Image: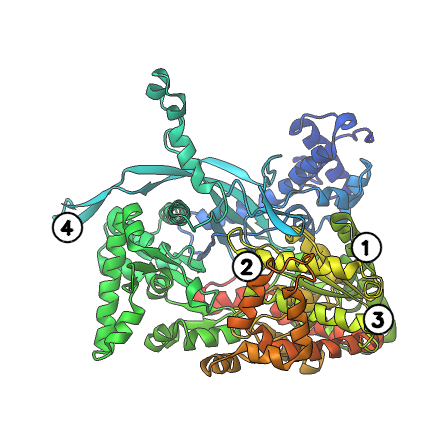
């Protein structure tokens, strides 16, 4: 492809700085494109590839972030600055591609589109070309990314700290219906968004022993003598706010050897030995979430957690001292948020740094640690609360084990003082679990070391208080908060659903993009406007045609854009109950075969999501979805009215096609098990209606949109617990319901597996013997609710009204609102200024 000739150099209005780096006009951006293609890609326009032009555009957009980025970093590091900084510690940051979001937040989409057209490209083609950084597994990492976007948008200086995984979450391929994991090579063409800080590195120690000694004043101290160390090097990514003066910092750590080459080993011919330390050290940041079933996997995951926590806290203390502040003021200057238990080692590591490096006494160090740290819990599943065997923990982190034991001793003394006759309470809250193999309970460490503990939905927080953290709530109720999750409207509307965003803006202006909670309700009067409804349906139809094309390209399955798009895309897990959805689809299939379904609205069931590599049941559910889909889709009677498709490799890029196109959002987890969910919010924001249980944030979404605009089914969390306590017998339900029995029998008989009766036997036995996630208990209610869904979808006017109401009512589920609540209730941080318009 030949590009147009390069234009003459443009300058800024003042004439003293070339706008090639800062100008935001189409002409300045076009000039910068050629400049970066020439100077950074070393390419002539006549020979440049799409990748070359993407890289040139990415550098062009990054350039326009740097003035604000440098100013924000200076505000964080400036001497004598009193600004309190948020440090968001997370093992995952699922940012999604940066280019489109950067264009939206900088307000230069149109100018960039005009500039790119001069080289013969469509802007969307270059945006789509970007590799997705797979630095997260799902909702946890995406939440962290939304919060970083919101922190910058509301002008709160913040640093996101994590790991620069060389290989992120695996790419998912489907072979004969089975999930196959492929290496995520997101860095193979380089990353134009990151800034390498080779000079910004910290040493992280492992193993060895500890020894007591006396300091210069005769105080007893402890010295850690490790037997190995690695170096963490900072890689920084600017995170711009929307029309904001703040561009925050995502600082990810890469592990390197302290000495990467051993000349002595090389000179004696041990060429592998010469680089062994480099290989072993770099393994720490090699891959996201290594399999922790084998011992070596557990070792590596603990090493990763200590690595990024230690680098991050050392960096915070460096910045703190650089600002001219005393170590004792650290808790007043930094809000250290632990996103789940993966960073919970921050409590022990901060204590170690304050005690052993800065020589504070225990009470000072503990007061600082508790004032600085806060903990977000993301699960009510006791088995999902992270623990580490004491033997492994002590072997890898001997000094930390001593500190944890001392924290625990002092903490339990306080507990005994408050409840002197309750020995069982002491056992239950102990950071060191004594049952079976001794283990360190990381959630307990996080709770003991934090001044605030929060759940991520009202129901979730209530369940935390009643179940897994009930004893900590009893001991310190004032430390518990609820902050319901939120999503950023910049990526999940302005970028991913531009047609709907533009329509909303024509009616209520564009302030909703940075004030979703305050402005979006103004859309409500248009819910009954016939003209507005027609425009709304046209935009949804366009999004559905686009998704149908993506699905055809990726799966070979043709789907009808006029059918109801019934979507369940999320991580594959039994409690999320994708297989309940499948049971309903088999029931629909049987009704259609017998022509007993009445007037059924044509439906396309769309699935997507990854199963953890070691999660065999989740992988089998993926195979079941494909097997049912293969039978349904080739049936000449059924397929015109029902299609089933699984879209592989669900990620942020794919989600940006799916959420705008969905008609129905499946949020059908067992009540009481989903902490919050954010997919439910993204679907509702794009006007999809929800079928769901009273679980996680579904409860609050239903309250917001109104019960009449939400398809509710299933037992409540209390009813689930009561049913299990009363001796739940799933086989009784199976025998009593003919349609349920038929669906399960068809799976068991091999109807969907070519006669293979063994393939899906684990699923059938799980449902009939245990049914831990209550599929059979909720089946009848779910099928009846789906009948209401089908009837409602046939009334286009009513459905469209409900769709508009859903969108207009979910403004409070913005991550901006959530971050404001963190600032007010937990971090004690005040935004520096309102976003610039």
x and y percent of residue 189 in the render?
62, 34
**Cα distance between the residues tagged 1 and 3:** 30 Å
Rendered position, 73 above or below 8: below
Q: Residue at x 39, y 44 (%)?
A: 296
Between 194 and 95, the residue placed more toward the observer is 95
Q: Residue at x 28, y 51 (%)?
A: 391
The quarter of the image holding the N terminus is top right
Q: Residue at x 38, y 24 (%)?
A: 274
Q: Which of the 4 image quarters holds residue 415?
A: bottom left
Q: Which residue is mark 2?
A: 617
**Cα distance between the residues tagged 3 and 2:** 45 Å
Q: Which residue is mark 3?
A: 532
x and y percent of residue 309 in the render?
40, 50
Q: Residue at x 48, y 79 (%)?
A: 724
Instruction: Tell me the element at label 1.
Output: loop
- The answer to whether marks 1 and 3 mark residues whose Cβ atoms lie closer than 8 Å is no
**Cα distance between the residues tagged 1 and 4:** 73 Å
Q: Which residue is mark 1?
A: 558
Instruction: Note whether residue 52 is visible.
Output: yes
**Cα distance between the residues tagged 4 and 3:** 74 Å
- The answer to whether marks 2 and 4 mark residues whose Cβ atoms lie closer than 8 Å is no
Of tags 1 and 3, the one toward the viewer is 1
Of tags 1 and 4, the one toward the viewer is 1
């Amino acid at each position: 492809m030949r590009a147009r000739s390069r234009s003459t150099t443009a300058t800024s209005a003042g004439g003293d700085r070339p706008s090639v780096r800062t100008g935001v006009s189409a002409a300045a951006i076009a000039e910068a494109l050629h400049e970066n293609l020439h100077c950074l890609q070393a390419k002539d326009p006549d020979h440049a590839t799409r990748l070359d032009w993407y890289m040139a555009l990415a550098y062009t957009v990054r350039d326009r972030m740097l003035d604000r980025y440098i100013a924000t970093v200076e505000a964080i590091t400036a001497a004598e600055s009193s600004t309190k900084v948020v440090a968001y510690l997370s093992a995952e940051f699922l940012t999604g591609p940066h280019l489109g979001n950067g264009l939206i937040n900088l307000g230069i989409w149109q100018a960039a589109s005009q500039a790119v057209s001069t080289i013969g490209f469509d802007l969307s083609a270059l945006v789509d070309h970007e590799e997705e950084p797979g630095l997260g597994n799902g909702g946890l990492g995406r939440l962290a990314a939304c919060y970083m976007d919101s922190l910058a948008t509301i002008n709160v200086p913040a640093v996101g700290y994590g790991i620069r995984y060389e290989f992120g979450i695996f790419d998912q391929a489907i072979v004969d219906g089975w999930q196959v994991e492929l290496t995520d090579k997101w860095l193979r063409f380089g990353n134009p968004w990151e800034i390498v800080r080779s000079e910004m590195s910290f040493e992280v120690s492992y193993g060895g022993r500890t020894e007591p000694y006396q300091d210069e004043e005769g105080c007893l101290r402890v010295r850690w003598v490790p037997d190995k160390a690695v170096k963490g090097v900072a890689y920084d990514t600017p995170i711009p706010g929307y029309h904001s003066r703040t561009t925050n910092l995502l600082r990810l750590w890469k592990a390197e050897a302290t000495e990467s080459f051993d000349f002595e080993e090389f000179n004696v011919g041990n060429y592998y030995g010469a680089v062994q330390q480099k290989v072993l050290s770099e393994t720490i940041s090699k891959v996201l979430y290594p399999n922790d079933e084998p011992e070596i996997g557990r070792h590596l995951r603990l090493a990763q957690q200590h690595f990024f926590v230690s680098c991050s806290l050392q960096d915070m203390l460096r910045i703190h001292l650089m600002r001219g502040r005393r170590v004792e003021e650290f808790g007043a200057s930094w809000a250290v948020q632990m996103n789940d238990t993966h960073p919970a080692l921050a409590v022990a590591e901060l204590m170690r740094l304050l005690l052993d490096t800065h020589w504070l006494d225990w009470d000072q160090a503990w007061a600082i640690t508790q004032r600085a740290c806060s903990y977000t819990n993301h699960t009510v599943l006791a088995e999902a609360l992270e623990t580490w065997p004491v033997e492994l923990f002590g072997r890898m982190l001997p000094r930390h084990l001593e500190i944890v034991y001392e924290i625990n001793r002092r903490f339990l003394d306080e507990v005994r003082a408050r409840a002197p006759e309750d020995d069982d309470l002491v056992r239950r809250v102990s950071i060191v679990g004594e049952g079976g193999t001794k283990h360190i309970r990381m959630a307990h460490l996080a709770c003991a070391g934090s001044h605030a503990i929060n759940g991520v939905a009202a129901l979730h927080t209530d369940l935390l208080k009643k179940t897994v953290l009930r004893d900590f709530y009893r001991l310190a109720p004032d430390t518990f908060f609820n902050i319901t999750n939120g999503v950023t409207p910049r990526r999940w509307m302005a970028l991913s659903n531009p047609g709907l965003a533009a329509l909303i803006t024509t009616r209520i202006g564009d302030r909703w993009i940075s004030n979703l909670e305050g402005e979006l309700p103004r859309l409500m009067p248009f819910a009954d406007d016939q003209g507005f409804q027609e425009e709304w349906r046209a935009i949804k139809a366009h999004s559905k045609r686009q998704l149908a094309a993506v699905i055809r390209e990726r799966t070979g399955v043709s789907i009808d854009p006029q059918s109801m798009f019934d979507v369940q895309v999320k991580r594959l897990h039994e409690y999320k109950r994708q297989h309940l959805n499948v049971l309903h689809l088999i029931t629909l299939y049987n009704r259609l075969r017998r022509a007993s379904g009445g007037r059924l609205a044509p439906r396309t069931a769309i699935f997507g999501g990854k199963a953890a590599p070691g999660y065999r049941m989740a992988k089998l559910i993926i195979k079941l979805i494909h097997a049912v889909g293969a039978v349904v889709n080739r049936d000449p009677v059924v397929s015109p009215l029902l299609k089933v498709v699984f879209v592989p490799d669900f990620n942020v890029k794919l989600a940006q096609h799916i959420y705008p196109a969905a008609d129905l959002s499946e949020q059908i987890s067992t009540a009481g098990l989903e902490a919050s969910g954010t997919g439910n919010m993204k679907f509702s924001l794009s006007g999809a209606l929800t079928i769901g249980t009273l679980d996680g944030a579904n409860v609050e979404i239903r309250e917001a949109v109104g019960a009449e605009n939400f398809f509710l089914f299933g037992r409540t969390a209390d009813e689930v617990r009561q049913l299990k306590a009363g001796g739940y017998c799933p086989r009784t339900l199976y025998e009593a319901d003919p349609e349920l029995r038929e669906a399960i029998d068809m799976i068991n008989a091999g109807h969907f597996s070519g006669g293979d009766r063994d393939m899906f036997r684990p699923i059938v036995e799980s449902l009939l013997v245990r049914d831990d996630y209550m599929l059979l208990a909720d089946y009848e209610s779910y099928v009846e609710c789906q009948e209401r869904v089908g009837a409602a979808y046939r009334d286009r006017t009513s459905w469209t009204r409900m769709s508009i109401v859903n969108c207009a009512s979910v403004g409070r589920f913005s991550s901006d609102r959530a971050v404001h609540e963190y600032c007010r209730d937990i971090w004690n941080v005040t935004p520096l200024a309102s976003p610039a318009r």
